[in-house]
Image: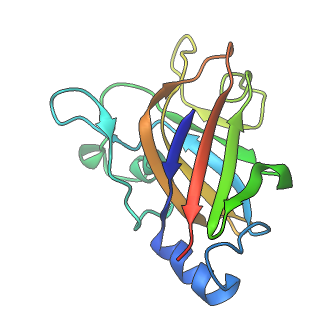
Amino acid sequence: MALFTATITNLGYAKLTRYWGGLLAPFEQIAYFKVGEGGWVDPGTGREPRVPDPALLDLDILVDVSRAPGDKRYNVGENFGYFQKALIGLDFSEPGAGILRVSCLLLNGDYNLKSDGVLVYNVGGPYISPEIWEIGLYDGDGDMIFYGTFAREIKDATRMIENVCRIVGS
């Protein structure tokens, strides 16, 4: 399980302060999450999580897709993807004052079965298990409100993965 504190995006901050009245009001507004195979950097010693960028409007891997071929961060001859899943009321809890806990659970088949959920995985041959490095929480408008990166998780169909996003209000 990856436990991390989410970074509020610039767009998320603007929406939270303008419409939601603060950080702990998004129970109804946060609708789904996406996990992806971006969000890492290789400084020459192997891949490690990238520092979350609050200016991102979507997962780093999806932003990278729109870049020019010579400007891609992840253009290393591999195929990358992401997975999207809806959140329900039971995924949210308040373990303490000013803290919102969001459980983003990937079941055994999530991100491993092409017919399950919204799966975009550009495989050019045999299917391989995705390497998850990043996560975003989105509102019903499709805007990424929170973003986080963590150490690599390999997702295969034999196990579930739970990423717990801890959001601390001011």
- Give the tally of numbered discs: 0
Q: Residue at x 30, y 43 (%)?
A: 73
Q: Relative to 52, say whether 125 is above or below.
A: above
The answer to whether one can see residue 75 in this image is no
Q: State the residue at coordinates (72%, 60%).
A: 94
Residue 49, placed above or below residue 158: below
Residue in the image at 48% along x and 68% along y = 9
When the figure is inspected, residue 28 is found, relative to residue 165, above or below; the finding is below
Colour mapping used in the image: rainbow
102 lies left or right of 115:
left
Q: Is residue 42 left or right of residue 32?
A: left
Residue 7 image offset from top left, x and y in percent? 46, 61
- Residue 112: x and y in percent read 67, 22
Q: Which residue reaches farthest front?
A: 96
Which residue is more in the foreground, 27 or 100? 100
Q: Position of residue 134 (x, y in %)?
A: 48, 43
Q: Quadrant of the N terminus?
A: top right
* Residue name at image x 24 percent, y 45 percent: 70
Query: Residue 20, percent across and down?
Result: 69, 82
Front-most of residues 98 and 59? 98
* Residue 29 appears left or right of 166: right
Residue at the extreme right: 89
User: From what the image shows, is residue 125 above or below residue 50?
Assistant: above
Residue located farthest toward the left when viewing the structure as drawn = 44
Q: Is residue 94 visible?
A: yes
Q: Residue 106: which quarter of the image?
A: top right
